[in-house]
Amino acid sequence: DSGVTQTPKHLITATGQRVTLRCSPRSGDLSVYWYQQSLDQGLQFLIQYYNGEERAKGNILERFSAQQFPDLHSELNLSSLELGDSALYFCASSAWGDEAFFGQGTRLTVV
Amino acid sequence: DQQVKQNSPSLSVQEGRISILNCDYTNSMFDYFLWYKKYPAEGPTFLISISSIKDKNEDGRFTVFLNKSAKHLSLHIVPSQPGDSAVYFCAASAQKTSYDKVIFGPGTSLSVIP
């Protein structure tokens, strides 16, 4: 158990809809990262939050947004969903300068 | 353009033998490299890392070798065990301190056959 909790584990939704993925980081970790893993692709970095503030952005679509709350949990919002958004979405957390610990992921299927 | 490549999508090895997973990178600024292991229905877990000032790092059955001139690293697992069957991701970064700079490869699926 990495200590990082992601919910839900699976999500099936229709095109055009909006979903929210949730992540609780390891106790004490201030950094939260979101990644997307599509079929046969590596983990693509989407966005990082550090202690409530956006710190870095990767290849995140404008339809996607995230936030980190005062209790340090984070949410990734995906809107106007398309078939190509079907993927595994991972959250990871770390203390500054340390390796990241990943959650189990949310498998999103857009139909 | 993929900056971190794992050209073998899959690998099968007999239990007890050596598993060698390869990784190539293109960015000469990368100076920190990691391997992650991922079981089905679980998130990736950190396995081992190496910084560019070294050419080898060992942790139990796992050894990572780095050849900077060839921009190549490899993960050796000796001896391989059935529990090692997983997807292995190679990753590289030009900055150790933040994972937003870490680039992951597509992964190699290792099957260790009893």
Image (spheres, rainbow, N blue to C red):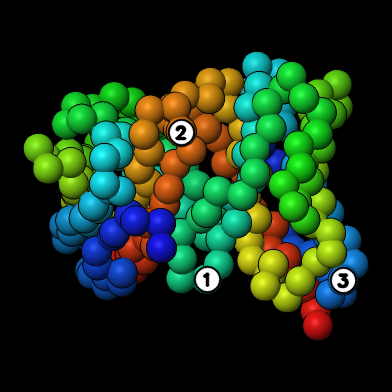
Q: Is residue A46 visible?
A: no
| Left or right placement of residue B101 versus residue B53 in this view | left
Residue A10 image label: none
Q: Is residue A73 above or below residue A22?
A: above
What amino acid does circle 1 point to?
Pro
| Dot 2 and dot 3 within a common chain | no
User: Outermost residue toward the right?
Assistant: B17
Q: Residue at x 30, y 48 (%)?
A: A26
SS class of the residue under badge 3? loop
**Residue at which label 1 appears:** B40
Dividing the picture into quadrants, the one containing residue B85 is: bottom right
> Label 3: which residue?
B16
Residue neighbourhood size for the residue with mark 2, other residues' Cα within 10 Å, grouped as few (<14), some (14–19), many (≥20): few
Q: Tell me: B45 left or right of A46.
A: right
Q: Residue at x 52, y 54 (%)?
A: B45
Of residues B52 and A58, the one nearer the viewer is B52
Task: Say few, some or many: other residues with alpha carbon within 10 Å of mark 1 (under 14 / 14 to 19 / 20 or more).
Answer: few
**Which amino acid type is marked by label 2?**
Asp
* Callout 2 secondary element: loop
Q: Which mark is residue A98?
A: 2
Q: Secondary structure at mark 1?
A: loop
Q: Is residue A4 left or right of residue B43?
A: left
Image quarter (top left, top right, bottom left or bottom right) of the N terminus of chain B: top right
Same chain assignment for discs 1 and 3: yes
Outermost residue, bottom direction? B114
